[in-house]
Image: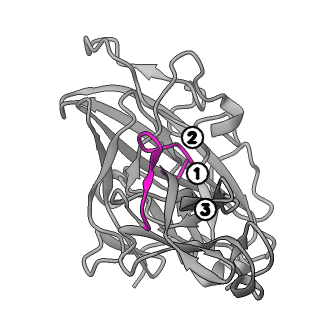
Amino acid sequence: MAALLSHGTARGAARTTGCFVRPPSLNFNKSKLVAGGYCVVGGQKVSSVIHYGVTQEDSSRYACGQTLNGVGSTVPLKSGIYQVTSTFMVASRSKFKGKILRSRPLTSTLLIGSRVLQCGKLNQTNTPTTTKVCDYQQIYTFPDVACGSLIKSPNSGYTGGYPMWSSKPFYQNFTVYAPSFISPSGSCSRVGDPPNSEHPAFTWMGTGVFRAYWNCSDGLSIFPLLYVYYYAPGANPDGPATCSYGEQNLWLGGEYSQFQLPLDSVGWGGKLYVEWRMLVSYHHGAYISQTYADKVISFTGSNNACYDMSFHS
């Protein structure tokens, strides 16, 4: 693995003077960030110290707390973060020819992959735009509600800030993920069935689907309700969906953070409209608000997906 040098090259490190920092890595359970480095003078190692700045981020790339600045080769990480961005630099403890030796700073981002923690903090004066959270403006579940708009319950009496979706649903490698969100507290943790456990809420399209919601530190709870509308090739996009799934036919009302499409979906044609409705409660009381985000997934095949999506044996 190549090292980042302040003088010379990695191969010539033993014959030169300078400081060298190795790219950081994660330990076996991804609970710590580990880096290394050293300084040499005339080919001889000298006492050195590693300086770091580490930012932990959720799946929306929002920072989880303040940047950690310190010294050392290991940095403990929060549980459930999505990725970590770090800058490491190595410096000599003593001066040589009147100067402290330093490596160039090395900045890198490592993907951890957990979408459990959402720490994006809502700025009420700069809320997400409709184009950021919606592919399609019409909401199928409630046609008189605009996608991306915040609908407050008129009888809740709640006077605090409201969380909102901050992205569209995300589709990658046959998996459809709920949108990311931002909240007034900036600290919300996932509750529910752990992904990839042996006991999913139910099986859909051959894959386990897991129930999930988020509890936030300010007493708000965020419930993601899933709705799926499929239009077969040639179907009228302004008419009824060829088949659909939501609160009425998904176990527990579609309260899920992700679901998977089968490998056979490479042969699907038509379009899939995925809609996530965010229901918000305060201290698990009555719902105080709702908002929507949606995504349109287009397919290039010719098969009708309704059979694959149905709950057949």
The disc at residue 109 is 3
Query: Would residue 5 appear left or right of 35 to someone viewing this image?
Result: right
User: Where is residue 228, by image quadrant?
Assistant: bottom right
Write down the region rendered in magenta. Answer: 55-73
Q: Which residue is drawn at 50% across and 39% down?
A: 141
Whether residue 244 can be seen here: no
Are discs 3 and 1 less than 8 Å apart at CB? no
Query: Circle 2 sits on which residue?
Result: 293
**On screen, 268 above or below 177?**
below
Query: Circle 1 sits on which residue?
Result: 169
Q: Which of marks 3 and 2 is nearer the N terminus?
A: 3
User: Where is residue 270, by image quadrant?
Assistant: bottom right
Give 157 or 270, whichever is nearer the viewer: 157
Q: Residue type at mark 3: give it.
A: Thr
Q: Which of marks 3 and 1 is nearer the N terminus?
A: 3
Give 222 or 205, whichever is nearer the viewer: 222
Query: Would residue 126 appear left or right of 313 to someone viewing this image?
Result: right
Q: Earlier in the sequence, mark 1 or mark 2?
A: 1
Q: Residue type at mark 1: give it.
A: Pro
> Is disc 3 placed on a helix, strand or loop?
strand
Q: Residue at x 33, y 32 (%)?
A: 280
User: Where is residue 249, by image quadrant?
Assistant: bottom left
> Is disc 2 placed on a helix, strand or loop?
strand
In which quadrant of the rendered image does the N terminus lie? bottom right
Whether residue 59 can be seen here: yes
Q: Please, what is the dominant secondary structure of the magenta stretch?
A: loop
The disc at residue 227 is none
Query: Would residue 12 appear left or right of 229 to someone viewing this image?
Result: right
Asked if residue 215 lies in the magenta stretch, the reply is: no
**On screen, 192 above or below 216?**
below
Q: Tell us which disc is closer to us: 3 or 2.
A: 3
